Image (cartoon, rainbow, N blue to C red):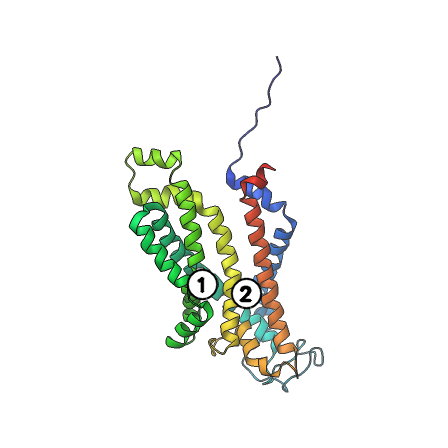
Amino acid sequence: MTDTPDYKAESPALEAWRMFRRNIPALCGVAMLTVIVLATLYGTFFYSGDPFDVVWAPHEPPGATPEFPLGTDYLGRNIVAGMLTGGGPTLAVGAAAAAITMVIGISLGALAGYYGGWVDNLLMRITEFFQVLPALLFAMVLVTLFSPSLWTIAIAIGVVSWPQTARLTRAEFLKIKELEYVTAARAIGARNKRIIWKVILPNAMPPLIVSATLTIGVAILFEAGLSFLGLGDPNVMSWGLMIGANREYILDAWWPVTFPGLAIFFTVFAVSLIGDGLNDAFNPKLRER
């Protein structure tokens, strides 16, 4: 008689973490995003300066003056100061817009998927209405009506970005609500509110976490687009505002647009790598493989 090895079951969270940490591109994304976040949080302690101050001649090229290694913009403002100061608002708008998107999308999608019937039909018709609206144009109208600020930009992005999250949540709820443990919860008298938020939603979170991660990148690009069109908050420096303010002079001076553009690119790229890594980590087929 041979002894069979006793395998200890691994929790889904630990298994997902094991898959994620083996994903080299995802770890590179975490490293890149960590460096960017630390630079925006603590960079001004080592390189202080008001990004709105005119400190030198306009369009000073990068490297021409040691005090301004990335040069100056069309007004003579320090680009390094703008990069370090503008990263915080850009990332904050992205995170806030993603949070608003997830709150609206998960709430409507959960109700539609769980109750079905006329509730599902009504909420999905509302979702389809917002889905067919031109997202950028609708966001521009909202920001214009309520005056440009970080909060109005984040809210506008969240309001136009939630339909995809709602559809994903609905699909997960339709699949999970028929499983045995949900039926057991109903059998013991659990209320609908508890079943939705305490039983089904935690098990539907893996794909929603991936969606939230990718939404941050989309929101950052959205904010940059609004700022490029002149709808950013003029009193708060951001990477999008830097690009929008210097766009007319790009043929004469490439650096005031290129450096914040590269910052946005690497931030969105890092977030995308993390999102892909999370998608692979939470994918049961890949874990089995």
Q: Residues within 10 Å of mark 2 (few under 14, many from 20)?
A: some
Quadrant of res 62: bottom right
In this image, 210 relative to 190: left or right?
A: right
Amino acid type, label 1 = Ala
C-alpha span from label 2 to label 1:
20 Å
Q: Nearer the viewer, residue 87 or 224?
A: 224
**Compared with residue 254, is residue 283 higher up or lower down, i.e. above or below?**
above
Residue 45 lies, in percent from the top left, at 57, 69
Quadrant for the C terminus in the image = top right
Secondary structure at numbered mark 1: helix
Amino acid type, label 2 = Leu
Q: Residue placed at 60% from the left, 58% from the top?
A: 270
Q: Residue placed at 40% from the left, 77% from the top?
A: 144
The circle drawn on residue 41 is 2
Residue 34 seen by the camera: no
Eye-nearest disc, 2 or 1: 1
Residue 138 lies, in percent from the top left, at 42, 70
Q: Residue furthest right?
A: 64
Q: Residue placed at 42% from the left, 64% from the top?
A: 132
Q: Nearer the viewer, residue 89 or 129?
A: 129
Secondary structure at numbered mark 2: helix
Q: Nearer the viewer, residue 73 or 168?
A: 168
**Compared with residue 39, is residue 285 higher up or lower down, i.e. above or below?**
above
The circle drawn on residue 97 is 1
